[in-house]
Structures are given as structure tokens and as C-alpha cells.
Image (spheres, grey):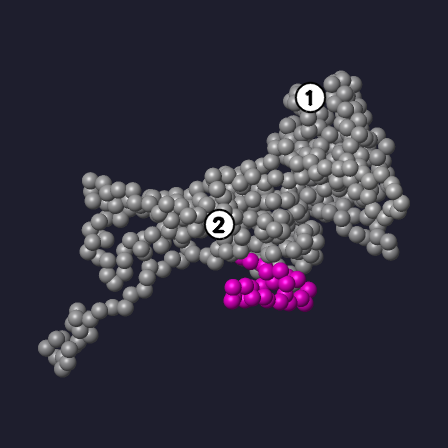
Amino acid sequence: MTSAELTALGVPAARTLSTTTKSVPQNQARTPLWLLRELPWVEVDGGTYRVNRRRTYTVGDGYLTCTLSGGTYQVIAPELRELRALRGVDDEDVLRELASSFVQEEFAPGDTICEFGSPIDRLFVIAHGRAITNRTGEFGDRVVLDVLGDGGELGSEVLLDASAIWEFTATAETACTVLSLARADLERVLERIPALAQHLSAVRAADRAAEGRYSKRGEASIDLASGHAGEPVIPGTFVDYDPSPREYELSVAQTVLRVHTRVTDLYNKPMNQLDQQVRLAVEALRERQEADLLTDPGYGLLHNVDPTQRLRSSTGRPTPDDLDRLLARRRKTAFFLAHPRTIARFGHECSARGIYPATTELHGKPVRAWRDVPLLPSNKIPISASGSSTILAMRIGESDEGVVGLRSTNLPDEYAPGITVRFNGIDDQAVASYLISAYHSAAVLVPDALGSLTITVQ
């Protein structure tokens, strides 16, 4: 219908005299940021946080990285220092000699790698695959002790004790490629390299001297007496501290926000342009903060799980049994953190078993839980190309010797705790610059505060 045929004012013309109701700029990249919300934040003066602990004598994580070349695996020689008995060996030629003595073996699913009660006559390193250690329970049932994956080792006792026996049975859960060092090959290396034999003898002597001097967690022991009567001599003691405590320096995420002065002068109603620009930039920085807290190679939680707290799923999938094993490794687990796809997969496994996890309320929002522990999503936890991912479980807070976030507040030009927005000047093009900085880090106060479960998301 043409304008000549209209009998009343048309909508397009009417809109020229009307105003619009506008939303603030929306951000589809925004996530719940559960980790930032749930971590207790510790004020860090001077930009550095030192974690003091009781002195610990155990060293080496026991995981040996292997390389693959032309279908053949090889232990990386310096990685042998991760074995406690070889921790002080500085001569890499010696380590290369040992690494070259490993022999590659293949095990099919269900094959026995070692058997309970038999002598430990070789050191095994799982180059690729998954193996389960188990033993017979009190009533003849099979009790699973641990699940080992790439880099796991079995039988390091062969380096120090010729009379040691296997205290469990290890079977291949999947096809496994294993590197083994036989006792006979080890002895030939020791004959050729007397310095290595002397080193192992010194480690044995140190172990005998240290018996009873440290706890099962490797901490220096505190001598006590109890249950006595009369006037016995009460043991004296002191609590030894770690002489080289770890220090965490605050990391920073930054960006320079540029806004033309003409925009802030003329187009500031009904919304303040600078406020909206800063808000969206800060939201992006907070997303980066959570990603850094999880994945940074230095302080990221995924890289700071103690070897004793790293578990693998017995089936590859995230099952209720696996989460129970993860829960049992620590007291007062505050929450699990996993990729949303991992949580969905866990729900599928529960449904397949006829189990329906309850929900709990957190900050007024319902979230899925397992054993009353919230299972929180974070898309910052990566999923590898092969489909593997990680579930984290953590205890939090300084008072509980848990995981804490680190930041510094009351900063100049502070926009939010630990985040500053600082005017950086106006250039010759009349563009104003604002430096936006977010300071953060995270610390694990004791090893069992943080645990991980490696699973496969199919």
C-alpha cells in the first residue's frame, strides 16, 4: 500500500519519532566461573605467597615419560630421576646406560604383568596403555588397589632390595606396551658403573637410618609417648620445617582498552559507553583468570596435583566407583570440578546403573552433586584430541589446609578485588587508553588437598 492510500500514520514513519528500549551489550562467552566463586581468596602482600610445610623426605613423582620412535618406546633418561632411588644421580651418561637396558614387551588385555607373592625381578614402566593392580581380599574377592596409565611404574624396589616380593597382582586392562629392566641387566650395569652401585648402597643405608624418622606421608616424625604409667622417660622432639618452601608469585592478565573520546563525549546516553566497555573487558579477563588457575604450567591446578593424588578411571569412563575413589583420598572435599561434557557422561553412567544423583543448592542455584559434594562445570578444563579429560576434587581454605586463591586488593584505581582500571592517557588521534589488570594465582597448601581423576569422554 502506497503512502497515498494510507488512512493513518504508518509504523515506519512513526518510529522516526519514537525511542527504543535497549539492553546492555550481551556476552555469550560468559560462563558461571564456579572456581573463582568458590575458592577462598587470600590477601597477598608483596605479591608473593610462601607455603610452609613440615619437612618432607620423599621426592620424585614416580612417573617416567617415554618417547615413541619408529614403533619403539624408550624411557627418557633424565626421567629416571623421578624414581626415588635414582633422585641424586647427576651423571646423565649413567641414566642413558640404564634407559638403554629397558626391553619393550607387549601385553594383551587380561594378561598378568606381575603376580602377588613372586619375587620382584624387574622394573616395569607402562609406556602406553592401562593396567590395574589388585589383590585377593579377606573373603576371596578381587580388590582393586590402583589404576596405572602411561608413565606408571611397578617394581622400583628392585633397585634397592634383592629380596622384595610383589605385594599385588598387576594385569593389563587394555593392550599395554611395557618397558622392563630385568635384575640381571641391572646388575650388569652396576658392574660397569661402580659409582651407580655406590649411590644405591648409600640410598639403602640412608633408608635404614631413617626408619621411624618420618611418617607414612613422608613428613619428619614427631616423637610421642602414650599409654605409659609410672615415670618413664618422655621422648623429646621438635617439628622440622621444609628448608625450601615453595613460593607463589601473583600472575597478571592484562589488556589495554581504547575508547575514542568522541564516543564517550557524544554517545553516553542512555548507557555510559566507557562503563560498558570496561565491564565486557573485565568479564573477558575473569574468564582468562579461571583458565589460568586451571591450566597455567606453573601454578595451574591441573599441573599441581600431587602424584599420590592422581587417579585413573578403571574403565576409562567416569563412573560412580571412580568418584568414590577420588573422594576417599581426602577429607572435607568441597566440590568436584569437571568439563560439562564430563558431567554429562557421568550422568549417563549413573543412568545406565539405575542411579540418579541428587542435586544440591549453591548460591541459590541447583547443581548436580555426588555424595552431597557439588559437581561443578568449567569449560576451561581441556578435553584432549583423544577424548581424555580430568575431574578435580579439592578441599579449600587456609584453615582446612586446602586450596586457596591468591590476590592483592586495595590497589590504586581498583575496579574490583584484584582488578584495576588505570587511565593511560589520550593519543594524537583523540583515543583514550585504559590499562586493565587482573592479579591472581592459586596455591595447594598440602598435597592431599587436591586430587584428579583422568577419564575418557566418549
- Who is closer to the viewer here, 101 or 442? 442
Residue 77 in the image: state x and y as whole percent. Answer: 65, 27
Q: Quadrant of residue 139?
A: bottom right
Along the line of sight, the residue nearer the viewer: 303 or 71:
303
Tell me if residue 332 is in the magenta stretch. Answer: no
- Would you name the residue on which mark 1 appears? 94
Q: Can see residue 371?
A: yes
Classify residue 89 as left or right of residue 159. left
Q: Residue at x 59, y 60 (%)?
A: 374
Residue at 68% x, 67% y is 354
Which secondary structure, mark 2? Answer: helix
The amino acid at mark 1 is Val
Check residue 373 for magenta coloring.
yes
* The furthest residue to the right: 230
Residue toward you, 28 or 306: 306
Task: Quickly name the residue at label 2.
Answer: 290
Q: Residue at x 22, y 57 (%)?
A: 267
Per the image, label 1 sits on a secondary structure element best described as: helix
Front disc: 2 or 1: 2
Q: Mark 2 near mark 1, Cβ–Cβ under 8 Å?
A: no
In this orientation, does residue 154 appear?
A: no
Q: Viewer-proximal residue, 49 or 259?
A: 49
Q: Give, as a single range, the part of the protein colored magenta.
A: 353-378
